[in-house]
Amino acid sequence: MDMQVAKKKLGLKEKYQVMTRGLDWEPSYQKKEDIYPYASYEGIKIHDWDKWEDPFRLTMDAYWKYQAEKERKLYAIIDAYAQNNGHLNVTDARYINTVKLFLTGVSPLEYMAHRGFAHAGRAFPGAGPRVACLMQSLDEIRHAQTQIHALSNFNKHYNGLHDFRHMHDRVWYLSVPKSFFDDAVTAGPFEFMVAIGFSFEYVLTNLLFVPFVSGAAYNGDMGTMTFGFSAQSDEARHMTLGLEVIKFILEQDPDNLPIVQRWIDKWTWRGYRVLTLVAMMMDYMLPKRTMSWKEAWEVYFEENGGALFKDLARYGITMPKCAETIALEKDHLSHQAWGTFYNYGAAAAFHTWVPEKEEMDWLAAKYPESFDKYYRPRLEFWREQAAKGKRFYNKTLPMLCQTCQIPMLFTEPGDPSKICYREVDYQGSKYHFCSDHCKAIFEHEPEKYVQSWLPVHQIYQGNCFPEGTDPTAEGFDPLAAVLQYYHLEFGRDNLDFEGSEDQKNFDLWRGQATKNG
Amino acid sequence: MSTVFIALQANEDTRPIIEAIAADNPQARINEAPAMVKIDAEGRLTVRRASIEERIGRGFDLQELHINLISLSGNIDESDDELTLSWHA
């Protein structure tokens, strides 16, 4: 007689052991150093890879099950959003410019993260981190794909989204996020994990996703809200991987501490500089705002990051020194960034504007120390000039920081009336920096950062014109040639929001949605 | 004592989970934001499988949390019965 005996299911901890360590093997005919050639050159010492454990104890079988569920939910909503012309429900068409910035600046980074974690996972001799890196690598390619799918719906209707991948490799402000990730993936596997897994995912990613996605929800963009939350549901696991990796490295050998501390200092600053774009998006580009950049920084970095570094103090890790500079910048960052984009609005693949009066009042309430004193007068002046037909578009290319590649727009710590300039002489050339922190990063690894592909330098060297361009021809217009090289259409993708095709179309279509046309 | 937090999407799946967390962690503060709920707690926060199962009337695998999880902080420990977030300092 056949008896069905229910097999005893493994507990979570046992299952995790079986599905990670249990799948690993010891090589017999190849040396370990040959199989894992990148595991030691960074100076990190690991004695026992089995000490690493994923506290979620997620295994691949469970991973596929939950990821499939997330995808089913996500695509049902994206389809419904597109079928229902959901894009017409956003607060106003200015909002769509945040989506353009996200697709051109952030989605390609997801793809690079996919590559980076695949590489790091392959490089680690331990089965635990290898499985966790494999999952994160798959998550990241999922994020790139779902973002491209969700945002392609906007591309059917609005300008500036038509060639995001081409733009990411060329457009001046997109070199900021691009070079950040290229910097990380060209580091060794341990530095990559500290850079992206810990400093970016654990310390800073909440500042990117939570306010952006909550902002999308608040501004009626269900498509973005959905891919954002779907991606963010993976982030909790990434943050956990980042934290566990740091603890694991530090517990393995006391010699690892100074190396890790240097990486944390470097990558917290590098990541923070990239978030300049997020600061400006939160304070200026969302028509309905959830919280200010400053508030988000206080909640997610000062409070949450503060707790994290207090916890890591038992290993000897201290809060990165750049936190003091960042605290001085938080009243100024978004205003200085938006002012720069307003100046260079002719060379950006999204629209810019001066905030409405009520929006300025909101900014004044959120930034009582700085907005009315330094930034409102400037914005009002620009508005007056534009009303007189003298809208100012800056055509002089800015000096860029050699490390973060941001134009030199930041002011001296503690003195918002003076631009901060730093420079270093290295092998007969002069290099320029936006801050002491970017300068210090360069000084530690000049061989790496002298190779930076700086958009402004490249334009001046004649490398950013379409093939066949003759810059000596009479009447040559360098800006027009650069925009062609970017695949950015003058008068459609750039300039003021006021009077743009996006604005006109959105008003027309929204009107048709409520009346018979 | 430092604060830990867990943030979940606001939907019908998470409503009973949030109720369970609130009942099991009297020190927790529930903060509602657009489309999400962020739960802060001093020092420590525990998500108990049994409390969720009582509210939803079926078996629940704590790993189902991943579907609606947005973010969290603190050191994590997960077993079949509970997920704990805590700071050591």
Image: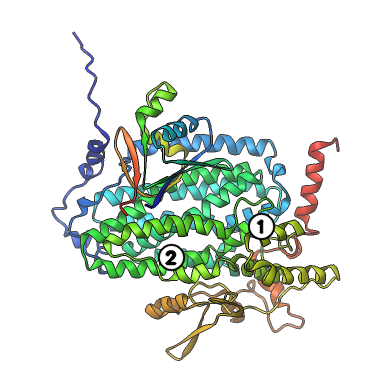
Pick whichever, A46 or A183, lies toward us: A46
Residue shown at the point (37%, 56%) measured from the top left = A308
- Type of colouring: rainbow
Mark 1 crowd level (few <14, some 14–19, many ≥20, 10 Å Cα): many
From the top left corner, tell me how far across and down residue A438 is, in percent.
46, 75
The x and y percentages for residue A100 are: 63, 56
Residue A285 numbered tag: 1
Q: Which chain hosts label 1? A: A
Instruction: Give the side of residue A311 with respect to residue A355, left or right.
Output: left
Coordinates of residue A88 in the picture (x, y in percent)? 72, 43
Subunit under mark 2? A
- Whichever of callouts 2 and 1 sits on the residue coming sooner in the sequence is 2
Q: Quadrant of residue A83?
A: top right
Q: Is residue A337 left or right of residue A321?
A: right
Quarter of the image that includes the C terminus of chain A? top right
For the residues labelled 2 and 1, the Cα–Cα distance comes to 25 Å
Quadrant in which the N terminus of chain A is drawn:
top left
Name the residue type under label 2: Thr
Secondary structure beneath disc 1?
helix
Q: Quadrant of residue A113?
A: bottom left
> Outermost residue, top direction?
A1
Q: From where the camera sits, is residue A226 visible? A: yes
Q: For mark 2, what is the residue?
A: A268
In the displayed structure, A252 sits above or below A146; it is: below
